[in-house]
Amino acid sequence: MTTLKITVDNKKNARLLSKVLKNMNFVKRIEEENKASDNQYKTLNKLFNNIEHGKVFTEIDDPVKWQKEIRDDWEAR
């Protein structure tokens, strides 16, 4: 048995190549690895696990006012 490692430029092309390979009877196994997404997932998971429940936006005194200011800022651009 021989193993090939292939690097593809984006997820869409990786899915396409994976579909093509799955239809070939001599391909025994396909493993997908997305290093950027894995690292992002681990980082976000660590951040979310370190936040106490209900303590995310404690510095915002008036959430409605805060959202309106953000929307106004977007519309001004």
Image (cartoon, rainbow, N blue to C red):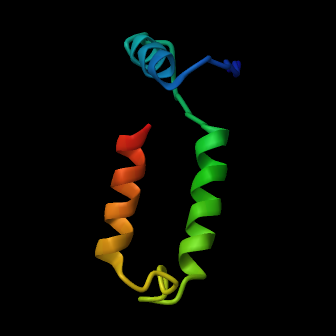
Q: Quadrant of residue 51?
A: bottom right
Q: Quadrant of the C terminus?
A: top left
User: Is 25 rendered above or below residue 67?
Assistant: above
Residue 66 image point, x, y percent: 38, 70
Which of 36/6 is in front? 36
Residue 25 image point, x, y percent: 42, 12
Q: Quadrant of the N terminus?
A: top right
Residue 52 image point, x, y percent: 52, 89
Which of 42/22 is in front? 42
Residue 16 image point, x, y percent: 42, 14
Count of numbered marks: 0
**Residue at screen point 52% across, 84% down:** 59
**Residue at screen point 62% across, 51% down:** 40
**Residue at screen point 50% across, 12% down:** 26
Which of 34/23 is in front? 34
Going by the picture, which residue comes out furthest to the front? 76
| Residue 34 horizontal side relative to residue 5, left or right | left
Which of 23/16 is in front? 16
**Residue at screen point 56% across, 67% down:** 45
User: Is 44 rendered above or below residue 48?
Assistant: above
